[in-house]
Structure formats: structure tokens, C-alpha cells
Image (spheres, helix red, strand yellow):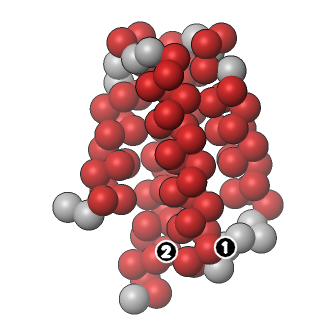
């Protein structure tokens, strides 16, 4: 598996047990997601996509509010991050 696929799996596993994650772990996963999405957007040329900016803003806010998020909000943020990364991975694979 690739590093990207491994990270997507890590996000999904974490989303399945949001109550077992510390606030630091949540914030760290979301921050890694933000960095990954930015890097992949640069590679795909999708930097100007309005929806992608919205997702990054939502993930940043969730990362900063990790202490205050409910388990459902944590799960949703992690699944959203995994979905965006998976979509960008598919786009990158098509261009190869």
C-alpha cells in the first residue's frame, strides 16, 4: 500500500473510535490531513477549487476546536478528510 492509502486507512480507523482518541491525536490527524490535502491539490492543479478551500477551513477549525468537538463531529471531520484525500489520490492516479 502507498503512504496515502495507509493514511486514509488510519483516518477511517480513527473515525470508527472517536471516543478513544485524545484531543491531541484528533488535532494531529486533522493537521496532517490539511497538509496532505494542500500537497495533493498542488500536484493535481486543483488549488483553486472553491470546495477544497472550504474543506480546509472546516478541518482547520475542527483541529483548533478538537477539545470541544463531540464524538460525532470528530468522526465527521475525519471521514471528510479521508474522502477528500481519497478523491485527490484518484485524480493523481488518473494523471499518471
**Horizontal side, residue 95 vs residue 60: left or right:** left
Count the marks.
Answer: 2
Image marks 2 and 1: residues in contact by CB distance under 8 Å? yes
x and y percentages locating residue 34 in the rendered image: 59, 49
Q: What residue sits right under mark 2 in the picture?
A: 91
Q: Residue at x 35, y 19 (%)?
A: 17
Q: What residue sits right under mark 1 in the picture?
A: 46
Q: Residue at x 67, y 73 (%)?
A: 46
Q: Residue at x 65, y 38 (%)?
A: 59
Q: In the current view of this chain or complex, which residue is farthest to the bottom?
A: 96
x and y percentages locating residue 78 in the rendered image: 49, 35
Q: Does any portion of residue 78 appear in the rendered image?
A: no
Sequence-wise first label, 2 or 1: 1
- Mark 1 neighbour density, 10 Å: few (under 14) some (14–19) many (20 or more): some
Give the camera-side residue of 49 and 64: 64
Give the camera-side residue of 71 and 67: 67
x and y percentages locating residue 27 in the rendered image: 55, 29
Of helix, strand and loop, which one carries label 1? loop
Q: Residue at x 28, y 51 (%)?
A: 6
Of helix, strand and loop, which one carries label 2? helix
Name the quarter where the C terminus is drawn: bottom left
Amino acid at each position: 500500500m502507498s503512504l496515502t492509502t495507509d493514511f486514509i486507512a488510519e483516518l477511517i480507523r480513527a473515525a470508527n473510535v472517536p471516543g478513544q482518541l485524545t484531543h491531541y491525536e484528533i488535532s494531529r490527524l486533522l493537521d496532517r490531513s490539511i497538509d496532505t490535502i494542500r500537497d495533493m491539490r498542488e500536484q493535481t492543479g486543483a488549488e483553486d477549487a472553491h470546495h477544497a478551500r472550504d474543506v480546509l477551513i472546516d478541518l482547520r477549525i475542527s483541529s483548533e476546536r478538537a477539545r470541544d468537538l463531540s464524538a460525532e463531529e470528530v468522526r465527521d471531520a475525519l471521514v471528510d478528510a479521508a474522502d477528500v484525500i481519497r478523491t485527490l489520490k484518484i485524480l493523481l492516479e488518473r494523471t499518471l
